[in-house]
Image (tube, rainbow, N blue to C red):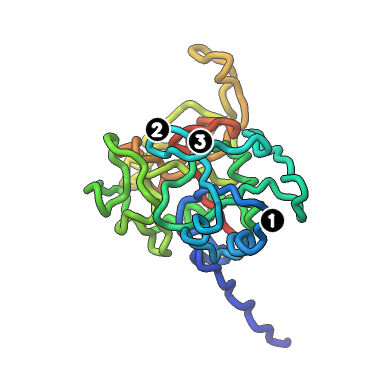
Amino acid sequence: MSWTAPAAAKKCPADSVQVGPACIDAYEASVWQIAPSNTGLVKKVQSGRVTLADLTGGGATQLGCKFAPFSQTAYPANFPASGQWTPVLGSSPPSPGVYAVSISGVLPSTCITWFQAAQACRVSGKRLATNLEWQDAAAGTPDPGTDNGTTDCNISTAGNPVNTGSRANCKSSWGVFDMVGNVDEWVADWADRTLNCTDWTSTTGIAGGDLSCFGGPGNTGSAGETSNDLSIPSALDRGGNWSNGTFAGVFTVRTSVNPSISFLNFGFRCAR
């Protein structure tokens, strides 16, 4: 029998870290509007080498929630909540001019639906991290943890979102930042929607008190439910956010909202 050398490990771009066979973005995504004609800047984004200075110096505009504390620019009309984007006129290859970036030092982009997040990753040569990849990449992030307001994971109910990578202690064993708290993160997977939330970790003997809204065949309009609670698909979100308090954690998993919803505390993370 002949011997076959193992495949070489994937070399991850500078904006991500190696987690098994995947490259997971080191930071929660920020979304930027860039003219597709600015090919040099677009190539830097797609290769994972872009910096904040590159973006601001190249005329890029950060997109997200329009109100404080974000005060970002709204997603353009050609990049609607449905993700059914249309190309910027003359762009080749076709592009909506909206790109997801993994950089430190900015507020993550939120007020974004699952569909928009998935497309922003794709246009940037990436994809949404899967639920499995997210869980693997979060290993070692402090949970349960405290929030000292400076270096710990941002889980204070009295706080606001903080800049990506600014909490030095909120880092996984793999080197991924902010996977607990700050903003909830859409992942690629869908499941049946549920409204039945529990602290499942304590029940199963895992420390953390992490929130789970997951499982079952979905709601079927039984007593106490409204027409909006009927069985509809949900996209998973992970990690919790700054207002979750003790419910944020590496085991927090929710299927309580549908993929067309956008909230100020919902962001995302890309992978390759």
Q: Residues within 10 Å of mark 3 (few under 14, many from 20)?
A: many
In three-dimensional space, the C-alpha distance between marks 1 and 2, rounded to whole angstroms, equals 49 Å
Residue at position x 42%, y 64% in the image: 174
In this rendering, position of residue 266 left or right of residue 1: left
* Residue labelled with disc 2: 198
Element carrying mark 1: loop
Tell me what residue is drawn at x 57 percent, y 18 percent: 228
Q: Residue at x 68, y 83 (%)?
A: 4
Query: Residue 251's x, y, as percent?
Result: 41, 46
Residue indicated by mark 1: 37
* Image x and y of residue 235, in percent: 57, 37
Question: Nearer the viewer's eye, disc 2 or disc 3?
Answer: 3
Q: Which residue is mark 3?
A: 111
**Spatial CA span between label 2 and label 3:** 26 Å
Q: Which amino acid does the dot numbered 3 rest on?
A: Cys
Quadrant in the picture for residue 226: top right
Nearer to me, 107 or 39: 39
